[in-house]
Image (tube, rainbow, N blue to C red):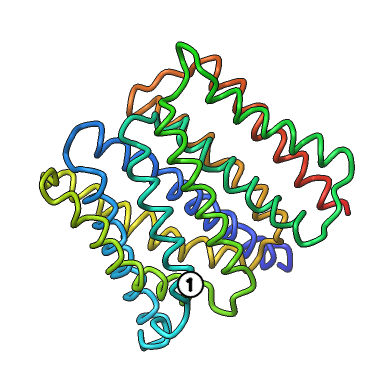
Amino acid sequence: MRDLDTSRPRLATLALTAAAMLAFAANSLLCRLALQTGGIDPASFGAVRIASGALALLLIVRWRAGSARAAVARGDWISAAMLFAYVAFFSFAYVGLAAGTGALILFGAVQLTMFGSALRAGERFVPQAWGGLGMAAAGLVYLVLPGVSAPPVLGAALMALAGVAWGVYSLRGRGAPDPLGATAGNFLRAAPIALLLWLPFTGVAHASPAGVALAVVSGAVTSGVGYALWYAALRALSAMRAATVQLSVPLITAIGAVLFLAEPVTLRLFLASVAILGGIALVLAVRRKK
């Protein structure tokens, strides 16, 4: 009976984690699909995503706590600016970037940003960790090197900036007593900033019902609900386990891109994935032992 009681929380954590990883991977697929079909422009996609994410998180926080006022008080404008930068760079990057490639660049940039912060804070890396870090960095360099199968330079650069912005956002929110409330507050602050992104592009802005629907799903479901699921799962995950499980996101995205977007899996993408994800996994494993 005791085994059954202990297995239920584990299964719940596994289900929450799996659902959150699927949601995070779906963000890349939804954005790429919306822009690939021309159903919406990137500025409008980003603005709708932030606005719908803010509304969804506000409703979740209100349902959880009975009041949404506390969410507005949490978070801060710098974190909101980093959130806005992530969504903006992310949206424009996927104009010409394949979903699988974009997710890999994003994840690699996020992790390298966080590792860099740890080094700056005084953490010492052993030789194996330095080897993993170099392996991941080399994988990113190889992925964007000029060649027939190389991704667009501008798209890769924008996605790397999106990863840096998300890494800074994650670092600023680390240790927050109520991460879901802080995320809701940051989304609410980022919503008016998103309008500033959209205004310069009003002359070329366009949005079909399908494009708007994809942006709303990306904001309300795979972002808003996805973050709620992830923060619920984090209660039962160690920091290292949480970082390790996120290695699955680029892989899920690549598989989804093949199945739903008919994107090819190139040798360059495969080798870069092995280097980047393998290098990051090595760093995480060494840090966990320490």
Q: Is residue 242 left or right of residue 159?
A: right
User: In which quadrant of the rendered image does the N terminus lie?
Assistant: bottom right
User: In which quadrant of the rendered image does the C terminus lie?
Assistant: bottom right
Q: Nearer the viewer, residue 48 or 144?
A: 144
x and y percentages locating residue 150 in the rendered image: 47, 19
Q: Residue placed at 57% from the left, 21% from the top?
A: 270
Q: Nearer the viewer, residue 16 or 97?
A: 97
x and y percentages locating residue 59 in the rendered image: 32, 75
Q: Residue placed at 86% from the left, 38% from the top?
A: 128
Instruction: Give the vertical position of 90 relative to 79 (above or below).
Output: above
Q: Quadrant of residue 159?
A: top left
Q: Residue placed at 40% from the left, 32% from the top?
A: 154
Instruction: Give the vertical position of 204 relative to 217 (above or below).
Output: above
Q: Residue placed at 69% from the left, 65% from the top?
A: 6
Q: Nearer the viewer, residue 277 or 78?
A: 78
Q: Amino acid at mark 1?
A: Leu
Question: Farthest residue in the top direction?
Answer: 148
Q: Quadrant of residue 63?
A: bottom left
x and y percentages locating residue 2 in the rendered image: 73, 68
x and y percentages locating residue 265 in the rendered image: 47, 19
Question: Farthest residue in the front direction?
Answer: 200
Q: Residues within 10 Å of mark 1 (few under 14, many from 20)?
A: many
- Residue at the disc numbered 1: 180
Instruction: Give the vertical position of 1 relative to 150 (above or below).
Output: below
Question: Tag 1's secondary structure?
Answer: helix
Q: Is residue 180 left or right of residue 243?
A: left
Count of picture labels: 1
